Amino acid sequence: MKKISLAVFLMAVSSLAFSAPVSTELKLGIDPTFPPFEYKDPSGNLAGFDVDLGRSICERIKRKCVFVENSFDGLIPALEARKFDAILSSLSINDERKKSIDFSSALYTTPVYLITHKNSGLVASADKLEGKRVGVQQGTVFETFANKYWRDKGVGIVAYASSDQIYVDLALGRLDAVLDDATSSTASFLSKPQGADFELNGSEIYDKSLFGKGTGLGYRKGDDQLRATIDQAIVEIKADGTFTRLNKQYFKFDVSPRN
């Protein structure tokens, strides 16, 4: 009898373990300093393209969005430390990051430019930027690009924890240029009075290995079930017109990923 009772007990415990409900929350790591992708409105509430996409994803997978604020350069370590379930913060998909995390299918892509004074005479090449100071945000693909192609050729690469401070220093003449996303730089600086004398310099800077795969959500390695669930939600968002509606709300051009 004792053996039978023990077996029944173990089966019951096992059944409970396998039927335990998945958390109803989806914790998303975000750095709200990238308008119009993620930022805080005048009331201090999170807003932006990524935030609205995240809420649409949560709605489809029937989980409550919880946004966890974190500095951009610390997002991947915080993900690995399980402070949240995924990163949703304009995270470019590239091979270097794939060594430590997995990605969703591509959400969107936006062009990269050098931002300079209108009369700077600068060009986005190492020989023209030699001896100049170029601002980038820590942990971004812009920092990776600048370090890879410009730093060893005499260009001063200045990394900042916040994009806000980058543009303060550009306006004050402490920087000669900034390497950044065109959409974010326009929303946070170029469209404002302090950015009136500055511009997107020249043509788009394109590096397929760093910028060519778009942005996506980042996951811990092996979190395949969550990735598959969210990828299906992304398919639905793009199929039912939600993505197009949000695209038009925030941008004047199509940010759909390139083929």
Image (cartoon, grey):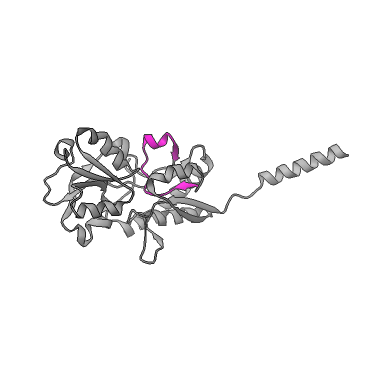
Q: Looking at the image, which residue sits at the far bottom?
A: 43
Q: Quadrant of the C terminus?
A: top left
In the displayed structure, does residue 169 sit left or right of residue 249?
left
Q: Position of residue 53 (x, y in %)?
A: 41, 54
Q: Quadrant of the N terminus?
A: top right
**Total tally of numbered discs in the picture:** 0
Residue 197 appears in the figure:
yes
When the figure is inspected, residue 169 is found, relative to residue 4, above or below; the finding is below
In the displayed structure, does residue 131 sit left or right of residue 16?
left
The image quarter containing residue 189 is: bottom left
Which region of the structure is painted magenta? 84-102
Q: Looking at the image, which residue sits at the far right?
A: 1
Residue 241 appears in the figure:
no
Q: Position of residue 33 (x, y in %)?
A: 35, 54
The image quarter containing residue 91 is: top left
As rendered, which of 23 and 193 lies closer to the eye? Answer: 193
The image quarter containing residue 4 is: top right
When the figure is inspected, residue 143 is found, relative to residue 61, above or below; the finding is above
Residue at (22% x, 56% y) in the render: 190
Q: Position of residue 218 (x, y in %)?
A: 44, 43
Residue at (20% x, 55% y) in the render: 171
Q: Does the stretch in magenta take in 98?
A: yes
Q: Position of residue 92 (x, y in %)?
A: 36, 43
Residue at (36% x, 37% y) in the render: 94
